[in-house]
Amino acid sequence: MNFLDTLVKKRNGEKLSPPEIDRLVKDYVAGEVPDYQMSAFLMAVYFNSLDREETAKLTTSMANSGKQLDLSSVDGIKVDKHSSGGVGDSVSLVLVPLVGAVGLKIGKLSGRGLGHTGGTIDKLESIPGFRVSLDTREFLTGMEKDGMAIMEHTSDLVPADQKLYELRDVTGTVESLPLIVSSIMSKKIACGPDGLVLDIKSGAGAIMKELERARELAQGCVDIGKEVGLTVTALITDMNQPLGRAVGNSLEVREAIKVLKDETSGELREVTVNLVAELLLQSGKVDSIEEGVEFAEDKLASGLALEKFERLIKNQGGNPEIIEDPSLLPTSENRVDVKLDGEGYVSGLDALKIGRAANILGAGRQEKGEKIDHAVGIEIEKKIGDEVPSSGRVATIHYNDDSNLEEAKPLVREAFTLTPSRTAKPELIKERIR
């Protein structure tokens, strides 16, 4: 099969056959198709798209491009979760032990942060000693014994996605919905769960800023799940303002611990509990979302989810004493309050600006492989709908480098918009797609 024929076919807007798609993935991973030809193909897809059948075949071919996790040795219902990325989004840190607490099994492969969004692996690595590189035996043992394990994505799992993503990143084709869908779903299919819940962010701090685009992405992933026999539910959630009140690696671990200790409410807890409720509904353990939310909340209140988090830390070599003594986590040398001129109510809190400010401080990276500072970040005191007194504090910046502070502080101030009258809090869960 000539790759050029396949390329020209898609350039002309024609439908590709399953063998054509399978061959182009295999040949590209094998190095038989050069980057310049695959770049042209990606651009053809960007302009002419792929239909549902083509996207499903591309997804399964990518999933089969490397090794796959075999979870058959793990008893019970195995589930997984994916987020499209946001700011102050430490959901996985709460969700994984909570899933273990409600009696499901979760083996989560996560990544590092890039750009303004944080990465679960970076957050976990702020816990002293925590190992994110596990072999398959350790990973499966954690799932079997305690119902949970988290590790970093490995290069031999879905290598096609890794190669294609790096090429999309430099060819202006990242935004192609079929390519996003196949990227997300190929990794999840290769992990072998029985059920999957997606947290698709929409708003200023999300990849999908418009609700319609977020809806298309969510529906595309659900449709692919149906094509391959995987139960998928997607929640579209608000990312116009940061999800939690902490942005930065060790700061987000601290906030997750507070949720697991049943010491705080708010959007982070609400989204996490609803995602777990969807997994419970998928698995048949509850008959309604309301029942699932109540079940999950009970496990937080009972302390079982916190116990599971402690076991997760111990299992993966971390220091569980951080739960009772957060000072053992990386801590910045300096802090400074951010105050606004005037008074009123927060009517806007730009998640993108907060994420960029955290990056400038050193909490994130612009290129793969960059070293990050686990201690720095931003604590948000006021969110949309909250009242701000005259010259009141709206955030606290944790920093180590004065030059970074000078650049980041104005961005944090600009992220806040005040109005004289109270603004309603934005709807957190915009849609549920099953």
Image (spheres, rainbow, N blue to C red):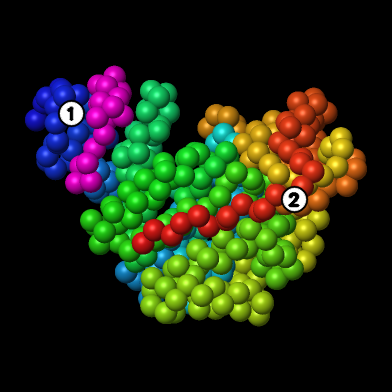
- State the CA–CA distance, disc 1 to disc 2: 51 Å
Helix, strand or loop for disc 1: loop
**x and y percentages locating residue 293 in the rendered image:** 54, 73
**x and y percentages locating residue 220 in the rendered image:** 32, 48
Magenta range is: 34-54
Q: Nearer the observer, disc 1 or disc 2?
A: 2
Q: Quadrant of the N terminus?
A: top left
The answer to whether residue 375 is left or right of residue 389 is: left
The answer to whether residue 120 is left or right of residue 378 is: left
- Tell me how many marks there are: 2
**Is the C-beta separation of discs 1 and 2 under 8 Å?**
no
Magenta stretch secondary structure, dominant = helix
Label 1 sits on residue: 13
Residue 284: assigned label: none
Q: Residue furthest right?
A: 390
Q: Residue at x 87, y 38 (%)?
A: 342
Specify whether residue 19 is painted magenta: no
As displayed, is residue 69 above or below residue 284?
Answer: above
Q: Residue at x 37, y 45 (%)?
A: 216
Specify whether residue 43 is painted magenta: yes
- Residue type highlighted by circle 1: Gly
The answer to whether residue 272 is left or right of residue 61 is: right
Counting residues from the N terminus, which is met first, the one under dot 1 or under dot 2? 1
Give neighbour class at mark 1: few <14, some 14-19, many 20+ (Cα, 10 Å).
some
Residue 422: assigned label: 2
**x and y percentages locating residue 404 in the rendered image:** 76, 28
Q: For residue 323, what is the image quadrant?
A: bottom right
Q: Residue furthest left?
A: 1
Helix, strand or loop for disc 2: loop
Q: Residue at x 70, y 49 (%)?
A: 423
Q: Nearer the viewer, residue 104 or 352?
A: 352
